[in-house]
Amino acid sequence: MKLTDTEIADNYNDVWVLGEVVDGQIHKVTLELLGVARKLADKRASGNSKVVCLLMGNKVNGLEKNLFYQSADRVIMVEDESLKYFNDLIYAAVVSRLIKKYKPEIVISGATSKGRSLMPLVAVQIETGLTADCTGLDIDEESGLLLQTRPAYGGNIIATIKCENHRPQMSTVRQGVFKAVEADNSRTGELIREGVLEEEKQTRFTVLSEESYGEDSKISLHDANIIVTGGRGVKSPEGFKIIHALAESVRGAVGATRATIDSGWISYSHQVGQTGLTVQPKVYIACGVSGQIQHLVGMQSSDFIIAINKDPDAPIMQLADVAIVGDLFEVVPEITKLMSN
Ligand SMILES: Cc1cc2nc3c(=O)[nH]c(=O)nc-3n(C[C@H](O)[C@H](O)[C@H](O)COP(=O)(O)OP(=O)(O)OC[C@H]3O[C@@H](n4cnc5c(N)ncnc54)[C@H](O)[C@@H]3O)c2cc1C
């Protein structure tokens, strides 16, 4: 439903983060989003915008403390047996009802598999817009609107999107795009408890169990300080052996470009880039990677980038802090030898 400026100004306030819990712990992306939610709330000219985390699940009691430490002013907690497994229909019904009740002006969620399933459903139910996979969020000083930045048209342009006439303004953001703020253990906040209505539990399907499938490398790309990435330059699945060896010698994780995944050389869980993961390691070593924009958007915020490529004019070589011109089949084993000694 289209709203007038007065309806928006009179009714909508606060920045919400949809919290996520994995194995009894707050998901890292939730902590990252609370940091950016704080900045957005502080920038609202009204000055009374609060950071609110909506936390839903079966056993989430007690987790609110961490959310307060990480910038939340208020936690709305929905703890219920029906939320044990992620059933997007139940979750969406509850989120939509609470959004209608509390009227936040901004709602952000991690672009996790749950967030990607939940947010579009909610956006349809409450009739508002949604910008997926944002790489930047800010407040327009003049209009007070949320500026939602993301790559568009296959990564060829960076678009900034506004949602002018509908509320809330909704975005998803991938893990690793923003950094979590330092926890302040002296912070506290307001805890509100809500429930799940009986009719919200009646859905067309029941989730019987949940299983997570992890990455097939020893260290998660999101947790790794060092990532060694192989591109089409590795030539074959066997070519990835030297990438794995270097990653192991520096206790890093293995990344990959989409070209290598499309060729079936390595699994999708390793993909870095626009349609893969966004990573921010301390050191990113790109081996035989050309550096197309769709790859760069997933790793360009790395602290230090080393590129190994035969072609000195490859785009990645311009971005790199250290660009090594050479054959990766000679250079990579040399570095591995040095690191292993
Ligand atoms: C909508 C869309 C989404 C996409 N999403 C992603 C994404 O998430 N992630 C992603 O990575 N890509 C993505 N892509 C694909 C992207 O456009 C590129 O095609 C891809 O990143 C190229 O991978 P590459 O660098 O491995 O291969 P290439 O571009 O073929 O580059 C190979 C490089 O290896 C070098 N090389 C070759 N042999 C050697 C050697 N022996 N030693 C050293 N260097 C060597 C070459 O000089 C070259 O620079 C997407 C594309 C589209 C359209």
Image (cartoon, rainbow, N blue to C red):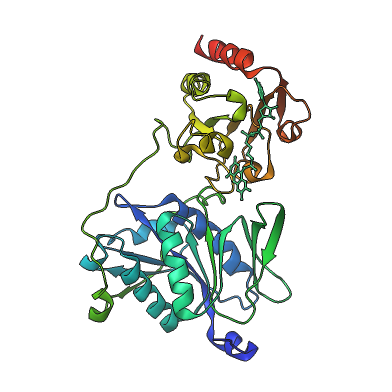
Q: Is residue 320 above or below residue 24?
A: above
Pinpoint residue 85: horizontal percent, then vertical percent.
27, 60
Q: Position of residue 121 (x, y in %)?
A: 43, 71
Which of these two is toward me, 287 or 149? 287
Q: Is residue 52 visible?
A: no
Task: Dividing the image into four quarters, tell me where ligand 1 lies.
Answer: top right
Q: Is residue 142 left or right of residue 188?
A: right
Left or right: 322 as drawn, with respect to 299: right
The residue drawn where x is 35% and y is 61% is 64
Asked if 12 appears above or below 140 in the picture, the reply is below
As drawn, the residue found furthest toward the right would be: 313
How many numbered marks have been drawn onto this rendered protein structure? 0
- The quarter of the picture where residue 228 lies is top right
Q: Residue at x 60, y 15 (%)?
A: 329
Q: Assign the N terminus to one quadrant of the image.
A: bottom right
In the image, residue 39 lies at what x, y percent? 59, 62
Above/below status of 3 relative to 248 = below
Q: Is residue 150 visible?
A: yes
Q: Residue at x 48, y 19 (%)?
A: 245
Question: Going 33% across and 58% down the picture, which residue do you hit?
Answer: 63
Asked where in the image residue 280 lies, by quadrant, the reply is: top right
- Side of 323 where 31 appears, left or right: left
Viewer-proximal residue among 51 and 221: 221
x then y, percent, for residue 243: 52, 23
Q: Residue furthest front?
A: 263
